[in-house]
Amino acid sequence: MRKQSYRSVFAGGAGVTYGHHSVWGFVGPRNDVINHAMMDWVTALQRPGARQVQFLKNLILSRPSLDRAADSGLIAAGQGGGGEHMEATGDGSYAFVYFPMNDHSATIDLARLKAQTVRAWWFDPRTGVGTLLGEIEGGKRHDFKSPPQGPDWVLVLDDAAKHYAPPGLNL
């Protein structure tokens, strides 16, 4: 669910919807199971996907979003295919790069950001928490490797001069 949601939004989608078979049918004592639902609808509201989709929304809203556009050119090497396909988006003052796999290496073209210094973060789409990696000289290519635990991560790259809040926080 996360892979398709993040890739869709980073590729230019305005948003995604999340649903669960048990919720759609309001499965429970008053409504029979339809479409292979596995639990009652109240329990389904607590599934990980229902909680985690909010982290994508929070991430997008934590940076200026009106000029955000898909930018697969940020990924200079290692974009992958199939289940390992990466997507990127941003507006020139920041970028989000979706790494659908842990321990995945990619070369990112920091010259596509208008920044002398880039602040880099790993954003965990399972928890909605960003971890600061540090600052990197802008204007050139840089190799990144997603953390070993996972499976998926978002690399957040900010123009350090913009002083954006940690990714996922809407201050």
Image (cartoon, rainbow, N blue to C red):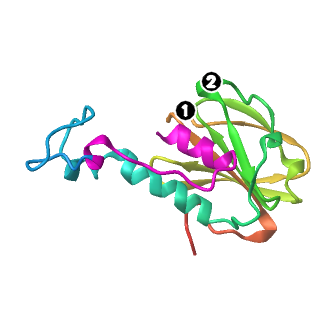
Image spot of residue 90 (x, y percent)? 75, 55
Q: Choose mark 1 or mark 2, whichever is in front.
A: 2
Most extreme residue toward the left is: 29
Q: Residue at x 25, y 46 (%)?
A: 25
Q: Residue at x 18, y 38 (%)?
A: 33
Image spot of residue 78 (x, y percent)? 75, 28
Query: In what element is the residue under mark 1?
Result: loop
- Inspect the image, locate mark 2, and give the three-letter code of the amino acid beneath it: Gly
Q: Nearer the viewer, residue 96 or 19?
A: 19
Q: Nearer the viewer, residue 56 or 28?
A: 28
Quarter of the view holding residue 8: top right
Q: Residue at x 78, y 64 (%)?
A: 160
Q: Which residues are magenta?
A: 1-24
- Inspect the image, locate mark 1, and give the three-letter code of the amino acid beneath it: Pro
Q: Is residue 127 left or right of residue 171?
A: left
Image quarter hosting the C terminus? bottom right
Query: In what element is the residue under mark 2?
Result: helix
Q: Answer whether residue 122 is visible to the viewer in this image.
A: yes
Q: Which mark is residue 148?
A: 1
Q: Which residue is mark 2?
A: 82
Instruction: Judge whether 18 appears above or below 60 on screen.
Output: above
Q: Residue at x 61, y 66 (%)?
A: 62
Residue 91, magenta (yes or no): no
Q: Residues within 10 Å of mark 1 (few under 14, many from 20)?
A: few
